Image (cartoon, rainbow, N blue to C red):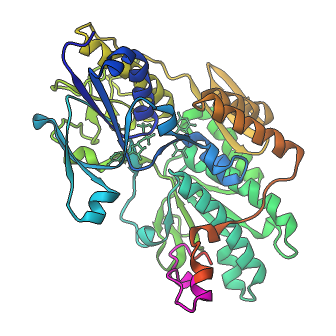
Amino acid sequence: MVKERARILVVGGGYVGMYTALRLQEKLKRELERGDVEITVVTPDPYMTYQPFLPEAAAGSISPRHVVVPLRRVLDRCRIVIGEVTSIDHAKRTAALTTLATEEDGTGAEQLTYDELVLAPGSVSRTLPIPGLAEHGIGFKTVEEAIGLRNHVIEQMDIASSTRDPAVRDAALTFVFVGGGYAGVEALGELEDMARYTARYYHNVRPEDMKWILVEASDRILPEVGEEMGRYTVTELRRRNIDVRLNTRLDSCADRVAVLSDGARFPTRTVVWTAGVKPHPLLAASDLPRNERGRLTCTPELRIEGTTHAWAAGDAAAVPDVTAEGPARETAPNAQHAVRQAKLLGDNIAHSLRGESLETYSHKYVGSVASLGLHKGVAHVYGRKLKGYPAWFMHRVYHLSRVPTFNRKARVLAEWTLSGLFKREIVSLGSLEHPRAEFELAAGGKPSHDPTDDPKGSS
Ligand SMILES: Cc1cc2nc3c(=O)[nH]c(=O)nc-3n(C[C@H](O)[C@H](O)[C@H](O)COP(=O)(O)OP(=O)(O)OC[C@H]3O[C@@H](n4cnc5c(N)ncnc54)[C@H](O)[C@@H]3O)c2cc1C
């Protein structure tokens, strides 16, 4: 039984936010029924995104709706508020919140008061002041970006197929990916595979007409699967004619020309930026302690250091890795830690409310699996190294076991099974992004979306 009435505020509805709230719902079931506890989850979108499926969503192997989990259905005993926390004053136990309503009313941010805070806004893309990047770069962290990129790639093939200008065609068929972590490598691997397949339905675009380039600043890619498997991945991608450039940086992408540090220049309409993440800027708008890299400094019990009633986990938190030998290290920002930390976080908040002792977070990283396209993959898990089809199969089995809810597992499995029986989807539904364009034209108005204004160059 909890000592006093507690209002728990969870900021973020991603891995940590959803799994922590889910655990709290289970652990504090009676308290929630009695009204002794109230859980509010604030998040900009009403769904949690299963990010490891984004590359397959971009390839068209999984529909966008099945990559996300509806929070209102899963967290049926929590209050879900769609909005953004813009600052936190933990000394006063208040968070400033903006929602669509506050924006429309012009009333400014609302103040939310809480007793326990779970701060889990995750991370944002780590960008650099590279000329042209803010105007032309495309991120790969959200389902909107993944589907937008799929549509964009197919649109470039349509542009290349219909133009008479060889320079336009060349730029349309050149795809530059910056960053060789799993997000970049999987996104490139899946999209190249999808585009190669799609090319068979074009009379004048062949796979060898396309240039796919991976730019990585260090001397290796996919550090998550270890050195040997990283080297294998480079060889495998090069065998597919993908131009992998190690020890190379993007210097500029102004005027739609990607200029690399090795002197190469590629006119292109596609620069995908997946060069790592940094903690969410909300953390800097709080009075909570952060380390030199901007992550919240946490204890192994997932409490924010030097505070009471404030907790964090996942990409936003610097949690000591108690399994590491040698100098003190923090757990890496990945889903493997985020899920496990969230479950412990839910338990520890329940313990704390009941005056019980807290548990310590301890998990040794077990390795990673990565998909490089249909039937292609690489894996290094529990000390076992796999390549090609077995790795790809393991990737699917692993993620199917991990994607939240039975409902999502069944839908994803059904989609994979059907796509094995029928041909792959090759359409671009880019026009979904501008649903009023046709009506505006028919009604004699000027389309509010002017295709020539599109920074990504999609038509
Ligand atoms: C393409 C891709 C593939 C990946 N593949 C893997 C993989 O194979 N294996 C692996 O281990 N990891 C993988 N990851 C990493 C993994 O997804 C992250 O480590 C994990 O999502 C971190 O969880 P989190 O809860 O800290 O952040 P997130 O899951 O990002 O959740 C943050 C939440 O906070 C919300 N939010 C943001 N700002 C605010 C605000 N101001 N107010 C309220 N809410 C806010 C966001 O909308 C989001 O819902 C991948 C990541 C990407 C991008």
Q: Who is closer to the viewer here, 118 or 329? A: 118
95 drawn magenta? no
Q: Residue furthest bottom?
A: 444
Left or right placement of residue 352 versus residue 409 in this view: left
In the depicted structure, whether residue 420 falls above or below residue 105: above
Q: Which residue is drawn at 60% across and 73% down?
A: 268
In the depicted structure, whether residue 14 falls above or below residue 360: below
Q: Where is residue 59 in the image (x, y as percent from the top left)?
A: 70, 53
Q: Position of residue 455 (x, y in %)?
A: 50, 75
Q: In which quarter of the image is ligand 1?
A: top left
Left or right placement of residue 236 versus residue 326 in this view: right
Q: Residue at x 45, y 18 (%)?
A: 363
Q: Position of residue 151 (x, y in %)?
A: 65, 65
Can residue 230 be seen in the rendering of this structure? yes
Q: Where is residue 74 in the image (x, y as percent from the top left)?
A: 50, 32
Q: Who is closer to the viewer here, 183 or 143? A: 143
In the depicted structure, whether residue 40 falls above or below residue 347: below
Where does the C terminus fall, quadrant-wise? bottom right
Q: Who is closer to the viewer here, 400 or 182? A: 400
Q: Which residue lies furthest to the left in this view?
A: 92
Residue stretch rendered in magenta on the structure: 440-456
Marker count (numbered)? 0
Q: Residue at x 78, y 56 (%)?
A: 425
Can residue 220 be seen in the rendering of this structure? no
